[in-house]
Amino acid sequence: MSQQTLNLAVIGNCQISALIDPGGRIVWACLPRHDGDPMFCSLLGGDTDDGYCDVELLNLASSEQRYQRNTAIVETLLHDATGGALRISDFCPRHRRFNRMYRPMTIIRLIEPIAGRPVIRLRLRPLQDYGASRPRITVGSNHVRFEGKELTLRVTTDAPITSMLEERSFVLSSRIALVLGPDETLAEAPGTFALTMLDATQRYWLDWVRTLAVPFEWQEAVIRAAITLKLCTFEDTGAVIAAVTTSIPESASSGRNWDYRFCWLRDSYFTVQALNRLGATRTMEAFLRYIVNIIESAQGGVLQPLYGISGEALLDERIVETLPGYRSMGPVRVGNLAYQQVQHDVYGAVILAATQAFFDQRLEVPGGRPLFECLERLGEHAIQLYDKPDSGLWEYRGRTRVHTFSSAMCWAACDRLARISATLGLSDRAAHWRERANEMQAKILQLGWDTRQQSFTESFGHPALDASLLLLHELGFLPASDPRFLSTISAVEKGLRRSNYVMRYHAEDDFGLPESAFNFCSFWYINALAVSGRRDEARELFEHMLERRTPQGLLSEDLDPRTGELWGNYPQTYSLVGIINSAMRLSRTWEDAL
């Protein structure tokens, strides 16, 4: 069995997703939704030979993988040593049907010979309960049922059932289809159904991409990031997950293994910003609805850092003993205890995201007085908490401080409430929120600034730096030309830049000294360089980050600054947003380019 890799393609339909390795093996797929039980879990299986769906070409000589242009359909080409070749087309159906979106819990694999007489072996080895056991198998004339404790996966196919069950090889003389989905009978032959779904899904994605606003430069990178960001949404509620996976370590054997199949409020502003720039207004508005529902259900207006994709608040964390982990680098965690942490920046993140509803005339449901009053309750929390200790956006589990970024985000909450008040014609409320924002800003400028370093610091009274300080201009806290912002950029690049990458921070935490660079921080640095007049440097570093993408055009959360190898959960929403926002900022305009 080959070593696990993050060189993976993702397919999905905003209900489920799956990861496919360069040889065409499905190595990760959670069912019946993004945060469900991974019936295909070999990505975290270490050396165990289970938990995947494989199309094995005998005498394999080479493989190549690509997306169909501007779609979420993956093609894997396998070549054998005698000139035989086949193509696997993988996708999850998504298209309009009966005047609504059809996005079933279904993965379709079309396998067709394209040269010679390829000999293949189908191997379906799903597991259940995070690798603890195999589902019970029952067989029909054209399907196999894998009966789990809570879910049954039915595989309907026109391939030889006996060969598939016994993993016997056979000559692939014509196209075959595998339809992996719910325990429902197909009304037509699997091959016919698969081709119909392929055509409809292809047309959906091509039409969706045509609606996007893209920069003149780096269009391929932006389109792939946009499609993948869309795949990381859970359309039923509008949630956007941080990543498809759990427990890919941030660096080798670091123990920094987290479950990212949830929605972090801190990501909301940057995600809304990216969707807005793309013109993906339906996706953006659905995400805003999810955020508003979180706000409305928050007890006493108190927000936690993350929520489940249904909006659930309790995300208790446990360690799974039945999966050894990525490259056997456990632990594998399900759930995330960060939901219990106190992170004051969430009030600013949510209000920054919701501000879009008050100024964007494209939205079906604009912001009004009821939403504003709801946001005001959050703003009162921001006033009370901006100078109080919290765990910070990096979710330190062992300490709390008054983090400068959290304080600045609380300031941003009040600043945006002042702007919303003005646009609603509420002059008294605008004056109130502007006065509060000014008071907070003055204190942050005093206590967050280190005269000796000539830089803002990670927290009040502590000299350490962190990359979030690069966002002070992005938030509107300081103009890009402010000497304090410019000298903070210099301090961060001196203390946190490693080669062409940027660390989150460089201080020991609960797990020791961090070893990996955080990809989104590198994009923050690129954007800070751009607004500070160092545009050529920013473009050069952006091009370098694009080179770090997998052959499928995706990025994980982290990378090793020495080797450039990707680590951390994958594909990472934050990193995709970084590609989109930086490309939009740095690209030449269409007018200048044409």
Image (spheres, helix red, strand yellow):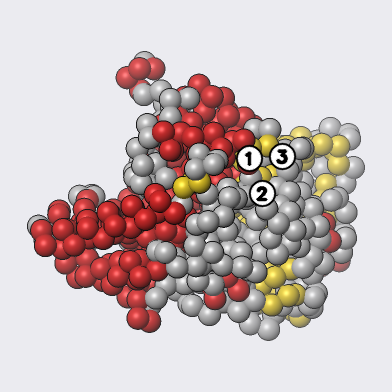
Outermost residue, bottom direction?
A: 149
Disc 1 and disc 3 in contact, CB within 8 angstroms:
no
How many numbered markers are drawn? 3
Residue indicated by mark 2:
506
Question: Which quadrant does the C terminus fall into?
Answer: top left
Which residue sits at x=21%, y=53%?
A: 419
How far across and down, in percent of the image, does residue 208 sit?
Answer: 40, 45
Q: With respect to residue 407, does 83 lie above or below? A: above
At horizontal 16% and vertical 58% (from top left) the residue drawn is: 431
Badge number at residue 181: none
Residue pictured at 45% horizontal, 68% vertical: 388
As measured in the structure, the alpha-carbon distance from the residue carrying label 2 to the one carrying label 3 is: 13 Å
List x then y, in percent, for residue 418: 21, 56
Is residue 553 toward the left or the right of residue 378 in the image? right
Q: Secondary structure at mark 3?
A: loop
Q: Residue tagged by mark 1?
A: 495
The three-letter code of the residue at mark 2 reads His
- Taking 593 as reference, is 117 above or below it? below
Q: Nearer the viewer, mark 2 or mark 3?
A: 2
Image location (x, y in percent) of residue 537 = 54, 24
10 Å crowding of disc 1: few (<14), some (14-19), many (20+) = some
Q: CA distance from mark 1 to mark 3?
A: 14 Å
Label 2 element class: loop
**Residue closest to the eye, 210 or 116:** 210
Q: Are marks 2 and 1 in contact (CB under 8 Å)?
A: yes
**Residue at which label 3 appears:** 561
Which quarter of the picture shows residue 416?
Answer: bottom left
Q: Amino acid at mark 3?
A: Pro
Task: Report which quarter residue 495 is drawn in.
Answer: top right
Relative to 390, does residue 9 appear above or below in the rendering?
Answer: above
